[in-house]
C-alpha cells in the first residue's frame, strides 16, 4: 500500500486523493521540530506510526482518516493530542488546502476548523490562547475560558460576514477578560453562544444555551447582576436608533427589578435584551 510523505507543496495532491477515496493520515513533528505528515489509502492510520518513526517523527502524534466532499476536508482524528491538532492547523495555514478543513474526534465532535483565507476574510485577532489575566482569580476566569474554548472552533462554521463579526466578538471577550471586566466578557460570550446556536452550528440549541448560561448567571450576586446591566447598557448604546430606544426602555425595567432585589425578573428582562442584541449581530 502506497505511503506518501506530504510536503507543503503537495497539500493539493492530498486533497485530490481524499476526494477520490477515504485516506489515512498521521502527523507529528520530527527531530528538528518540522512538520511530518504522511498519508495512505485505507482506514488503518495506526499502520503509519512505524513509517513516521523511521522518518524521524515521535510522540505526540495525531492520526486518523480523511475524505474531501463538497469543498470540505473532514479529518477524523482517532488520536488527537491538542498540541498536534494546533500544529496541523498551522501547517495548513502555511500551505493552504483551498477547502474548509474540519478536525473532528472519532465521536463526531468538532475539535477545530480552518477556512481558506482570502483578502476579505483574514482577521488577525486574539483568541482563547491569548487569555493572560494576571492578578485575577483563576477560578473566576475558568468558566469563561472553558466556554470560549468550546465555541471558538464553531465560529469557523458560520457564514462569511457573521464569522468575521463573531471572531471580533471573541477577540473582544478575550480583551475584556484580560482587563478583569468579567461581567462584560460574560455578556459578550453569551451573545456569541446564542448566535452560534441560532444558526444550528452547535450541539446545543438556543434554549439549552440560554439555560446553561442562566445557571452560571444564577451563581452570581446582586452586584454581579448590576454589572451585567451596566455591560448591557454599553451594548444597547451601540444599537441602531429604534432598537436602541426599545432596548433602553427594557433595560430601565430590568433596573427597576434590581432596585427591588427581584433578581429573577431582572434576569428574565436581561435575557430578553441579550437575545435581542444577538438578533442584531
Image (cartoon, grey):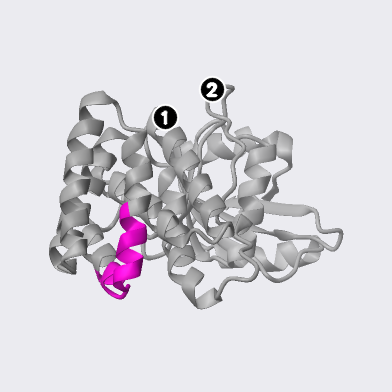
- Asked if residue 68 lies left or right of residue 248, the reply is right
Q: Position of residue 183 (x, y in %)?
A: 41, 60
Residue at 17% from the left image edge and 45% from the top image edge: 250
Q: Position of residue 127 (x, y in %)?
A: 56, 50
Q: Give the total of numbered labels.
A: 2
Numbered mark located on residue 120 in the image: 2
Residue 225 in the magenta stretch? The answer is yes
Q: Position of residue 265 (x, y in %)?
A: 13, 62
Q: Nearer the viewer, residue 217 or 200?
A: 217
- Distance between mark 1 and mark 2 Cα atoms: 9 Å
The reply to whether residue 188 is in sight is yes
Q: Report which residue position mark 1 lands on.
A: 160
Q: Circle 2 — which element? A: loop
Image vertical order of residue 202 relative to residue 123, above or below: below
Q: Nearer the viewer, residue 217 or 93?
A: 217
Q: Which stretch appears magenta?
A: 215-229
The answer to whether the residue labelled 1 contacts the one labelled 2, judged by CB atoms less than 8 Å apart, is yes
Residue 218 in the magenta stretch? The answer is yes
Give the quarter of the image for residue 257. Answer: bottom left
Amino acid at each position: 500500500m502506497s505511503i506518501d510523505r506530504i510536503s507543503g507543496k503537495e497539500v493539493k495532491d492530498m486533497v485530490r486523493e481524499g476526494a477520490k477515496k477515504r485516506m489515512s493520515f498521521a502527523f507529528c513533528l520530527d527531530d528538528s521540530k518540522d512538520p511530518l505528515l504522511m498519508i495512505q489509502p485505507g482506514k488503518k492510520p495506526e499502520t503509519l506510526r512505524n513509517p513516521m518513526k523511521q522518518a524521524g517523527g515521535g510522540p505526540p502524534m495525531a492520526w486518523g482518516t480523511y475524505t474531501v466532499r463538497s469543498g470540505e476536508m473532514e479529518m477524523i482524528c482517532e488520536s488527537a493530542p491538542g498540541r498536534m491538532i494546533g500544529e496541523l492547523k498551522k501547517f495548513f495555514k502555511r500551505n493552504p488546502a483551498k477547502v474548509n478543513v474540519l478536525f473532528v474526534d472519532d465521536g463526531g465532535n468538532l475539535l477545530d476548523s480552518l477556512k481558506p483565507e482570502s483578502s476579505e476574510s483574514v482577521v488577525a485577532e486574539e483568541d482563547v490562547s491569548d487569555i493572560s489575566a494576571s492578578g485575577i482569580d483563576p477560578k473566576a476566569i475558568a468558566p469563561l475560558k472553558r466556554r470560549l474554548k468550546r465555541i471558538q472552533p464553531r465560529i469557523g462554521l458560520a457564514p462569511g460576514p457573521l464569522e468575521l463579526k463573531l471572531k471580533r466578538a471573541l477577540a473582544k471577550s478575550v480583551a475584556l477578560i484580560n482587563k478583569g471586566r468579567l461581567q462584560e466578557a460574560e455578556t459578550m460570550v453569551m451573545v456569541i453562544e446564542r448566535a452560534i446556536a441560532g444558526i444550528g452550528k452547535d450541539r446545543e440549541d438556543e434554549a439549552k444555551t440560554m439555560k446553561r448560561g442562566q445557571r452560571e448567571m444564577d451563581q452570581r450576586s446582586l452586584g454581579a447582576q448590576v454589572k451585567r446591566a451596566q455591560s448591557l447598557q454599553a451594548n444597547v448604546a451601540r444599537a441602531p436608533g429604534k432598537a436602541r430606544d426599545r432596548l433602553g426602555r427594557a433595560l430601565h425595567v430590568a433596573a427597576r427589578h434590581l432596585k427591588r432585589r427581584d433578581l429573577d425578573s431582572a434576569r428574565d428582562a436581561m435575557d430578553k435584551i441579550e437575545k435581542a442584541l444577538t438578533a442584531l449581530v
